[in-house]
Amino acid sequence: MQLLLKSVDFAARAHRDQRRKGPAEEPYINHPIEVSRLIVECEPHTHEDILCAAILHDVIEDCGATRDEIAACFNDTVADIVLEVSDDKALPRDERKAQQIETAPDLTEAAKLVRLADKVANVGAMLTDTPIGWDEDQILAYVTWAEAVVAPCRVVSDNLSERFDAIARDVRAFHTPEEQQKAEAGV
Ligand SMILES: Nc1nc2c(ncn2[C@@H]2O[C@H](COP(=O)(O)OP(=O)(O)O)[C@@H](OP(=O)(O)OP(=O)(O)O)[C@H]2O)c(=O)[nH]1
């Protein structure tokens, strides 16, 4: 519990000037808190190190924190999970997106759990707080990409996988134009 609160404190400070991409402009820290909450709800016996990594999962990628800094403040396990789920923002966007799909099968079980919960949260946001400026094609492409990233991660949690499937289905239904839905259903 102490380490988990320490991770919330660390991440809140690291993300202090960042907002989510939706019109609500939620403080960024709401996202890692949601990711950690999803893991606890779906897999209540998850080790505290993994919950800390879920809270910290974007601090390397988005805030410039380092693996060694996290290892010093927390431990090597937490630091290595965060590093595993961190994109290299120096790479072009398309390359980063392709890498997430390519590397997903080789992630540790802990990193797969964080990755899966991250995508449940991000796809869910397409219903509750759609990123500003995203049209339906971009939203549906994000869902398709997230499904590819999630596919090899599903083995770590049936509960989280079910949540992902339900949310992806709802997002598709909500953002697919009515005429296209009718055509696909053969109506
Ligand atoms: N869906 C959603 N994403 C948001 C929001 N605010 C920030 N993001 C971030 O934006 C990414 C999705 O936008 P993209 O255009 O596809 O990618 P990019 O920002 O990484 O270039 C997510 O990356 P990711 O790789 O899926 O997740 P993560 O590992 O960075 O958390 C997430 O980090 C939001 O309100 N909704």
Image (cartoon, helix red, strand yellow):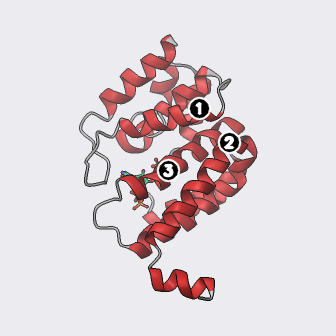
Tell whether label 1 touches label 2 (CB within 8 Å): yes
Q: Left or right: where does residue 141 sit relative to residue 9?
A: right
Closer to the camera in the image, 12 or 75 = 12
Q: Which mark is residue 41?
A: 1
Residue at left offset 38%, top offset 53%: 128
| CA distance separating discs 1 and 3 | 26 Å
Q: Please, what is the three-letter code of the amino acid marked with disc 3?
A: Asp
Graded by Cα atoms within 10 Å as few (under 14), some (14 to 19) or many (20 or more), the crowding at tag 3 reads some
Closer to the camera in the image, 96 or 45 = 45
Mark 3, residue position: 87
Percent of width and height locating residue 6: 43, 17
Closer to the camera in the image, 2 or 59 = 2
Residue at left offset 51%, top offset 45%: 86
User: Is label 3 within 8 A of ligand 1 (CB to nearest ligand atom)?
Assistant: yes
Mark 2, residue position: 159
Q: Left or right: where does residue 30 sit relative to residue 18?
A: right
Percent of width and height locating residue 141: 50, 70
Tell whether label 2 touches label 3 (CB within 8 Å): no
Q: Please, what is the three-letter code of the amino acid marked with disc 1?
A: Glu
Q: Left or right: where does residue 150 sit relative to residue 19?
A: right
The disc, 2 or 1, on the residue closer to the chain's N-terminal end is 1
Residue at left offset 58%, top offset 40%: 114
* Secondary element at tag 2: helix
Percent of width and height locating residue 167: 54, 55
The disc, 1 or 3, on the residue closer to the chain's N-terminal end is 1
| CA distance separating discs 3 and 2 | 26 Å
**Mark 1 or 3, closer to the camera:** 1
The disc, 3 or 2, on the residue closer to the chain's N-terminal end is 3
Identify whether 2 is placed above or below 101: above
Percent of width and height locating residue 80: 59, 32
Graded by Cα atoms within 10 Å as few (under 14), some (14 to 19) or many (20 or more), the crowding at tag 1 reads few
